[in-house]
Image (cartoon, rainbow, N blue to C red):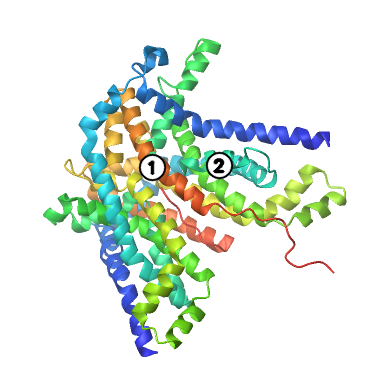
């Protein structure tokens, strides 16, 4: 048994050393650098005391919230539908909806430009219809569109997996007792999918709070926290503030995911 | 029944709109990369000129990204598979905690991780300026996906019985690991590998801060092209990226597609 434990320990060791040297140690250092600026550890409070930082925190959280709600509604409707109704072409639709699963943020930004940019499709169509060109890619609305685009494939997969496990007998029972469709959705399907909604929603939220590539592609003027951190780091060379803000950002996303994990009781991790 | 049919049509219509939202821009950008002048439309003619310009200007980024993603795969295999094995063998509170920790780099934004790496190792000249600095970030970010994927398979099989059987026949640890454990979790290793390569190929959040002018990866080149070059070149570059990444994504889809399960009651009712 001793030898067995020793063997397991040494198998885990390489990953452990790598993780310690390149993640835990650097994050600890980041924390102390964050407190090494002119204001000391008060820099960590700046995110709520400084008017500009606080404004971008509020808009970042608002954007993430809007992204989460929109993505859950869209993916909930399509995911349950695709899982329940099998028809020719169903598999193709699922394949198309999950294709952008691992597109990086920069490419998502470019997709938004193709749709809503200066030479985009939406601009062309609105010009044809109303004579006025609608261009919103380079603003908060464009970023919102990009984050929803990014989150749909992942969320649909989660919803479909959960919908597969719903017991159809519950629905049948509700129907046979005379419940109209909307009551079945409200009282049977949505409660059954709640854990999936919580875990997928947390991932949407955390990704929208921490993502950087899409905002970077669309415009550097969009006032969200990751862009503020990037500006502090490169243009202002304010290393301490950038460190403090990014540490707070990391803590926010980590807490959101950890809370969701306890609420949903399953494994949750963000990506992107 | 009429109500059900109407509901079906509405849901199908909605799903088709969502599909169009995701797929139309992909098709548009592929088309734009092959069009002589996007502003005047496809009738201006199809051309490979823009793809050629991408090839001559950004070739290195493509090779570097392939190289880094393969090294990243090797790294996650060496570090991740043994770690997953240990976590599958010991299901205790401690191993749960270790798994939690290992997944953290995915939960924490890439921007924060990259800044942490820079403040800690930024002064290590040769390391900071080489592509291995980017590689470290990518391994950190993709390792959880490999561990999770292998762990899921290992937890689903009866590892203990298999290993005991082999051990009772006299197999040593190395023999058991390479001839029993690895072959049994190859589907997890394969799915994890595809995910790792795909993610490493597209990683931008960290890479943008970790790269130097001499170590530009494909997504970094893309961001460059989007910011400073005409739409057609950005599109052609995106097209090249799609050609590299879409086969990987399709393979991943085929591999991880949930098998159709019929609605059979778990326990028959009396």
Mark closer to the observer (2, 1): 1
Q: Which residue is mark 1?
A: B245
Q: Is residue A216 above or below residue A229?
A: above
Q: Secondary structure at mark 2?
A: helix
Q: Is residue A10 left or right of residue A187?
A: left
Rendered residue at 32%/57% (across/down): B73
Report if residue B108 is visible in the image.
no
Rendered residue at 65%/52% (across/down): A163
Question: Residue extending furthest bottom?
Answer: A1
**How far apart are the two marked residues, 2 and 1, measured between alpha carbons?**
24 Å
Q: Is residue A15 left or right of residue A203?
A: left
Q: Quadrant of residue B90?
A: bottom left
x, y (%) of residue B143? Answer: 36, 60
Q: Which residue is mark 2?
A: A71
Report if residue B254 is visible in the image.
yes
x, y (%) of residue B173? Answer: 36, 81
The subunit letter for the residue under badge 2 reads A
């Amino acid at each position: 048994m001793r030898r067995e434990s020793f063997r397991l320990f040494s198998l885990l060791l390489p990953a452990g050393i790598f993780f310690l040297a390149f993640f835990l140690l650097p994050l600890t250092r980041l924390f102390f650098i964050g407190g090494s600026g002119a204001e000391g550890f008060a820099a960590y409070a700046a995110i709520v005391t400084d008017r500009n930082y606080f404004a971008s925190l509020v808009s970042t959280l608002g954007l993430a919230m809007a992204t989460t709600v929109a993505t859950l509604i869209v993916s909930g409707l399509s995911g349950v539908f695709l899982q329940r109704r099998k028809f020719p072409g169903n598999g193709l639709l699922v394949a198309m909806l999950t294709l952008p699963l691992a597109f990086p943020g920069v490419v998502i930004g470019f997709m938004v430009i193709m749709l809503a940019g200066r030479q985009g499709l939406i601009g062309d169509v609105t010009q044809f219809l109303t004579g006025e060109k609608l261009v919103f890619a380079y603003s908060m609305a464009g970023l919102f569109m990009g984050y929803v685009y990014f989150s749909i494939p992942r969320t649909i997969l989660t919803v479909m997996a959960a919908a597969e496990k719903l017991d159809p007998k519950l629905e049948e029972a509700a129907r046979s007792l005379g419940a109209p469709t909307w009551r079945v959705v409200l009282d049977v399907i949505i409660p059954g999918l709640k854990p999936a909604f919580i875990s997928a929603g947390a991932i949407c939220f955390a990704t929208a709070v921490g993502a950087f590539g899409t905002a970077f592609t669309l415009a550097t003027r969009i006032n969200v926290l990751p862009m503020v951190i990037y500006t502090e780091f490169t243009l202002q060379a304010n290393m301490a503030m950038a460190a403090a803000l990014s540490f707070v950002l990391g803590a926010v996303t980590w807490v959101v995911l950890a809370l969701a994990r306890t609420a949903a009781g399953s494994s949750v991790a963000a990506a992107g | 029944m009429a109500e059900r049919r109407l509901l079906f049509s509405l849901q199908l219509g909605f799903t088709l709109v969502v599909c169009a939202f995701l797929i139309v821009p992909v098709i548009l950008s592929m088309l734009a990369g092959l069009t002589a002048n996007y502003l005047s439309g496809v009738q201006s003619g199809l051309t490979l000129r823009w793809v050629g310009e991408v090839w001559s200007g950004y070739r290195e980024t493509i090779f570097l990204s392939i190289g880094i993603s393969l090294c990243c795969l090797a790294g996650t295999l060496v570090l991740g598979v043994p770690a997953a094995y240990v976590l599958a063998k010991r299901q205790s509170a401690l191993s749960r905690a270790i798994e939690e920790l290992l997944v953290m780099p995915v939960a924490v934004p890439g921007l924060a991780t990259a800044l942490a790496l820079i403040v800690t190792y930024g002064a290590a000249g040769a390391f900071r300026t080489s592509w291995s600095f980017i590689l470290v970030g990518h391994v950190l970010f993709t390792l959880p996906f490999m561990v999770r994927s292998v762990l899921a398979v290992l937890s689903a099989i009866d590892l203990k019985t298999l290993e005991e059987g082999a051990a009772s026949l006299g197999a040593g640890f190395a023999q058991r690991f390479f001839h029993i454990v690895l072959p049994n979790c190859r589907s997890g290793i394969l799915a994890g590998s595809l995910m790792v390569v795909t993610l490493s190929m597209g990683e931008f959040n960290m890479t943008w801060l970790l790269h130097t002018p001499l170590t530009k990866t494909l997504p970094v080149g893309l961001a460059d092209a989007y910011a400073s070059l005409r739409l057609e070149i950005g599109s052609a570059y995106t097209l090249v990226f799609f050609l590299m990444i879409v086969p990987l994504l399709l393979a991943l889809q085929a591999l991880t597609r949930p098998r159709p399960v019929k609605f059979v009651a778990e326990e028959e009712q009396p």
